Image (spheres, rainbow, N blue to C red):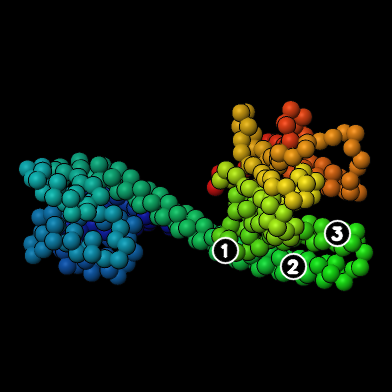
Amino acid sequence: MQVKPGAARILYIDDDPGIARLVQRHLERSGFAVTVAQNGDAGVKLAAEHNFDAIALDHYMPGRDGLDVLAALRAMDMPPPVIFVTGAEEPRIAVTALKNGAADYVVKDVHGTFIELLAASLAQEITRARLQREKDAAEQELRESRDRLEKLAEQQAVLLREMNHRVANSLQLIVSLLELQARKQPDAQLRAVLRQAADRVEAVALVHRRLYTGSDVAFVDMAGYLAGLVEELARATHAGDHHQRVEVSAVPVRLETDRAVSLGLVVNELVTNALKYAYPLDAPGAVRVILDYDPQGALRLAVEDDGAGYQPDAEARGSGLGSVIVTAMARAAGADVSRDEAYKGTRWVATLAPPAQAVAA
């Protein structure tokens, strides 16, 4: 019989020539390409030499019985599904075959009516095996894609860390140049302006140092950042020499780099201003930087002191650039900033919106 090209290839192993011819004719009429082996050794040899889509295996054969042949077939590299054919009086053998790796079993009868069931089982197992291969291939492709993405992400993280390293170095160079220029400047007011500019650049540089020394190149740990920033400010302004201190209290939260930089500049301006004007030169006092959540769950940043407080009729001190920077940087961070008029000293609060942008550390 002429078999259609692309037909599923079946190996039928059975020592009964009559049954084998009957099965072969019926399966070929069902669209399969059938090869017959008349004993177990021949079947194992054919299975090793050719790529069959499925194998039907009779149990009772001289020499090697079906269970022995099944074990040899299952030991092959990527074996096709095996349909075990056994007699009605031996259900125990069928169960054993399934436990040993057979995909299905069919009970043989003397009239040959089992062949319909065999054809249906072969078609089903061939389809299942094809779907399994496609699933395995898709999962392998997914794993490879994930591995490529992870490798790409690692490479990008290295590049970002290197970029932050270079940016931090460049900013530190600018800080050094500004401080050098300030030291050589005879005008005290201009020296103060240059040093304040250096502090502002240092606030940005500190973020990039945190990024290239940490494991996360996209987010900044705000608690560590604020602590480092305040430490730099206290050192630059000699706060300890004037009996003043800066305290930091921050919830564990990470923010995107851009927002962290903007809030760092806000803190820089407010803390510097408080250290200058909140307390008399030799009087002790504290400036507090607090990062927490308000009752509505929004992240908020507060800078406060217990000094004389805001005096609207007092003569303006400074150029007013600090207020402009605070307003602009708070807006850049997506925050609303305002002075708490009910506070006894001075308290500025920046509330971030939306709070969902923050990531718990």
Q: Please indicate, yes or no, whether residue 17 appears anywhere in the rendered image.
A: no
Q: Residue at x 33, y 45 (%)?
A: 124
Q: Nearer the viewer, mark 1 or mark 3?
A: 3
Q: Earlier in the sequence, mark 1 or mark 2?
A: 1
Q: Name the residue under label 2.
A: 172
Determine which residue is flagged by label 3: 192
Residue type at numbered disc 3: Ala
| Residue 69: assigned label | none
**In the visual, does 31 lie left or right of 113?**
right
Count the labels in the image: 3
Residue 361, position as x, y percentages in the image: 54, 47
Which of 272/92 is in front? 272
Q: In this view, does 260 lie above or below 51?
A: above
- Of the residues under marks 1 and 3, which one precedes in the sequence? 1
Q: Where is mark 1, residue-wise?
A: 154
Amino acid type at mark 1: Glu
Disc 3 versus disc 2: distance between alpha carbons?
18 Å
Instruction: Using residue 62 as the reference point, say whether residue 34 is left or right of it.
Output: right
**Image spot of residue 42 (x, y percent):** 19, 67
Which three-letter amino acid code belongs to the residue tagged 2? Gln
